């Protein structure tokens, strides 16, 4: 197992992260490092704590213990104001897109610029339309409501929103879930293109192995609240780890026993 | 039944109640602290004022009109038994401005606005839109809760002031056209016994009720979970708790504003 980033100060360094909900232990002393400009995909079954890990890192959820460092700055126990400053480095694409249905598409994309960075609406709209073009959507889409878009288009808009403020770190939560294989591949290509153009660090969580193989420099597998294997994408087929083998081949038989109850 | 289990279940209910009260108190304090710290999103505040105040006007106005009309009829039938019909205008104006305008108006708004706020914020919660706000460097409390609570507190007294006028007018219509009062004498009686305090105390009540309605909608919506069922439950809790708090606070405020002075 190698949960460390290749070299230098990691962009994200998670050490001994713990999180429980009642008696259910979700993260059990998890360690993970992600280097600057690296694209790491965390794989794992449903309910293994992938989303909880992402939410703890981005500050949407408070971990019970351990350490989360962003660019070497400790986030745990920091006052809210200081944490908000560091959190401006993040962009996030949510599993269900999480677009604001009361706003037209361009305002969704420009939201972070207008509300979070106090940029004038006209200038923010121009940037939003550029980002929409970057994900293959024309300016006419900017005037539509999110409810008028297909699932794939909503994902593209969510991607445009995540990259609009040019974040240093982007978190992708199940970016291809619910999409057909072709649209999933389009989203994967867009993720690679956008992350490269920004020079951003990316952390994705998914159980879609096709997507993981395509967008990851390194893959880490989470099981029972810990990273049980981590390595370059090319090595995933020769991991020598029975859990990883079972997961990537999608076998029901193996050391991973699916829980039939959430708690 | 095992007495230990019985006691344990009573204890669990008690502890859950305390913890819910604590969470609600923290939410209220957090809301109040954000209300007095910039930035305040004025564009959103204006939109909420229109939603809460302007669009509630037809339903609150109609309720006030019929309340005033029924009150005039009932008072007349009751008071005519001991030849006190001349008190009808006084009873109507004092009842409407002190009690019925604020309370019935607030209960109508709780049903219309409290439910809408809880459903909107609840849906935003279960579809990760509230988390998305945080990731876009926007404080969800300032963006969602503060404009609604401020708008509720400001719009409700304006709404109730208009409802008071419509309610008194309803009584005047019935008094003049059905009960055959002299219209100018009816208005004179209305004005003679009405004091500024009657109106302002009713408006203070309205402001408190507006705050409570928006706060309950925001609290239950903001903390909803569990998909569509959770949003439905949040809506129900918001309306029921706001309605109960309106009636409870009405008693407390009446005791302070009218009996205590």
Image (spheres, coloured by chain):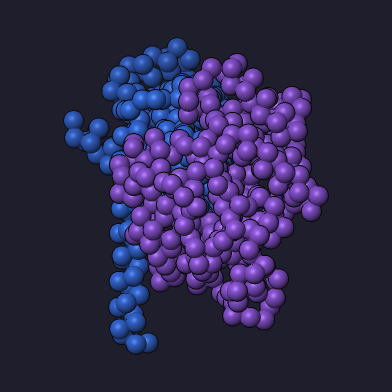
Q: Residue A182 or B255: which is nearer the viewer? A: A182
Q: In x, y percent, where is residue B48? A: 51, 28
Residue at horizontal 36 percent and vertical 25 percent from the top: B38
Q: In x, y percent, where is residue A169? A: 52, 41
Colour of chain A as rendered: purple
Residue at horizontal 32 percent and vertical 28 percent from the top: B36
Residue at horizontal 61 percent and vertical 39 percent from the top: A195
**In the image as oriented, which residue stretches furthest toward the front?**
A7
Q: Is residue B213 left or right of residue A250?
A: left
The quarter of the displayed image where residue A236 is located: bottom right
Quadrant of the snapshot with the N terminus of chain B:
bottom left
Quadrant of the snapshot with the C terminus of chain B:
top left
Residue B20 in the image: above or below residue A167: below
Q: In x, y percent, where is residue A204? A: 59, 51
Q: Let me know if residue B254 appears in the view.
A: yes
Q: Let me know if residue B75 appears in the view.
A: no
Q: Residue A192 or A88: which is nearer the viewer? A: A192
**In the image as oriented, which residue stretches furthest toward the bottom?**
B2
**In the image as oriented, which residue stretches furthest toward the left?**
B261
Chain whose colour in the figure is blue: B
Q: In x, y percent, where is residue B53? A: 51, 26
> In the rendered picture of this protein, how many numbered marks are placed on residues?
0
Residue at horizontal 35 percent and vertical 67 percent from the top: B13
Q: Is residue B130 left or right of residue B16?
A: right
**In the image as oriented, which residue stretches furthest toward the top?**
B184
Residue B243 in the image: above or below residue A88: below
């Amino acid at each position: 197992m190698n949960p460390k980033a290749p070299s230098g100060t990691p962009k994200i360094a998670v050490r001994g992260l713990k999180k429980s909900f009642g008696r259910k232990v979700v993260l059990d002393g998890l360690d993970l490092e992600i280097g600057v400009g690296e694209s790491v995909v965390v794989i794992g079954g449903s309910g293994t704590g992938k989303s909880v890990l992402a939410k703890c890192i981005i500050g949407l959820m408070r971990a019970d213990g351990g350490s989360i460092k962003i660019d070497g700055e400790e986030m745990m126990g920091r006052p809210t104001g200081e944490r908000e400053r560091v959190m401006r480095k993040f962009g996030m694409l949510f599993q269900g897109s999480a677009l604001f249905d009361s706003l037209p598409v361009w305002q969704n994309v420009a939201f972070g610029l207008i509300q979070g960075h106090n940029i004038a609406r006209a200038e923010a709209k121009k940037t939003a339309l550029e980002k929409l073009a970057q994900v293959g959507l024309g300016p006419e889409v900017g005037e539509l409501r999110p409810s008028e878009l297909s699932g794939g288009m909503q994902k593209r808009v969510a991607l445009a929103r995540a990259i609009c403020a040019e974040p240093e770190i982007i978190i992708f939560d199940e970016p291809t879930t619910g999409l057909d294989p072709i649209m999933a591949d389009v989203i994967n290509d867009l993720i690679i293109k956008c992350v490269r153009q920004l020079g951003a660090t990316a952390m994705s969580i998914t159980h879609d192995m096709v997507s993981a193989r395509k967008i990851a420099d390194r893959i880490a597998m989470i099981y029972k609240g810990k990273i049980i294997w981590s390595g370059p994408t090319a090595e995933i087929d020769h991991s020598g780890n029975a859990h990883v083998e079972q997961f990537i081949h999608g076998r029901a038989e193996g050391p991973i026993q699916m829980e039939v109850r959430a708690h | 039944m095992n007495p230990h289990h019985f006691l344990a279940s009573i204890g669990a209910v008690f502890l859950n109640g305390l913890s819910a009260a604590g969470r609600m108190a923290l939410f209220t304090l957090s809301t109040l602290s954000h209300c007095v710290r910039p930035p305040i999103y004025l564009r959103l505040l204006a939109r909420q004022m229109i939603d809460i105040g302007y669009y509630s006007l037809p339903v609150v106005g109609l309720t006030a009109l019929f309340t005033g009309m029924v009150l005039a009829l009932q008072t007349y039938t009751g008071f005519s038994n001991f030849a006190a019909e001349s008190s009808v205008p006084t009873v109507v104006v004092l009842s409407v401005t002190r009690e019925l305008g604020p309370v019935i108006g607030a209960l109508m708004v709780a049903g219309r606005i409290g439910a809408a706020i809880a459903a909107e914020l609840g849906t935003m919660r279960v579809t990760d839109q509230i988390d998305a706000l945080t990731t876009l460097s926007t404080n969800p409390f300032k963006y969602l809760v503060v404009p609604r609570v401020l708008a509720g507190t400001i719009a409700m007294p304006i709404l109730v002031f208009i409802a008071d006028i419509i309610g008194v007018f309803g009584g005047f219509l019935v008094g003049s056209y059905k009960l055959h009062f002299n219209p100018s004498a009816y208005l004179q009686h209305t004005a003679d016994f009405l004091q500024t305090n009657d109106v302002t105390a009713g408006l203070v009540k309205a402001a408190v009720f507006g705050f409570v309605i928006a706060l309950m909608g925001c609290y239950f919506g903001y903390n909803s979970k569990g998909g569509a069922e959770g949003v439905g439950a949040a809506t129900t809790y918001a309306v029921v708790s706001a309605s109960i708090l309106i009636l409870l606070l009405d008693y407390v405020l009446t005791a302070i504003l009218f009996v205590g002075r």
